[in-house]
Image (tube, rainbow, N blue to C red):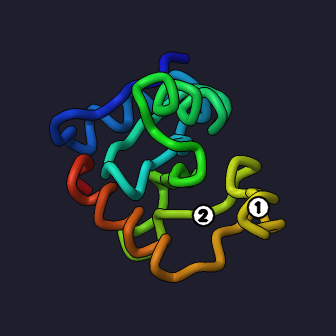
Amino acid sequence: MSVYILDKKINHEELAKIAKETFDSLVKGAADVEKEKIAIGGEWHSACQEILVNQGSDGRNIWGFNIHLDQPKENHLEFFSLINIKPSLGIKDMEIQDEKVKQAIKIIVDKFIEQ
């Protein structure tokens, strides 16, 4: 149940190994949309967030997501996480509503994960 900060692109097989550690066909992750960093794995999005914050990310720029390995690429990302609730920014939803944030996460995921 490790959390991994990706600094190079991983392939689908490597992603599947990470998924097997926890939810089998699902990987939790968090992305810093400002620094374009990503952490994946573990049981909780907050574990990914914590590692990014420890490496200098600002929590206001970190958003949680899920990758569903059993879905086609166009549907594999889900933008639903407790860490997406940001009262200081006026955000009270677990699901990301801002399309710019969703697009930024998609770009970061594509940068580091081959699907």
Residue ID for mark 2: 79
Image height of 1 relative to 49, above or below: above
Residue 101 placement (x, y as % from top left):
49, 71
Residue 21 placement (x, y as % from top left):
52, 22
Image height of 57 relative to 80, above or below: above
The amino acid pointed to by label 2 is Phe
Q: Which element carries disc 1, helix, strand or loop?
A: loop
Residue 16 placement (x, y as % from top left):
38, 36
Q: Quadrant of residue 7?
A: top left
Answer with left or right where residue 112 lies relative to residue 94.
Answer: left
The residue sitting at 45% across, 49% down in the picture is 31
The amino acid pointed to by label 1 is Met
Image height of 88 relative to 113, above or below: below
The residue sitting at 40% across, 25% down in the picture is 55
Q: Earlier in the sequence, mark 1 or mark 2?
A: 2
The residue sitting at 26% across, 59% down in the picture is 110
The residue sitting at 61% across, 34% down in the picture is 23
How many residues crowd mark 2 within 10 Å: few (<14), some (14–19), many (20+)? some
Task: State the CA–CA distance, disc 1 to disc 2.
Answer: 8 Å
Residue ID for mark 1: 94
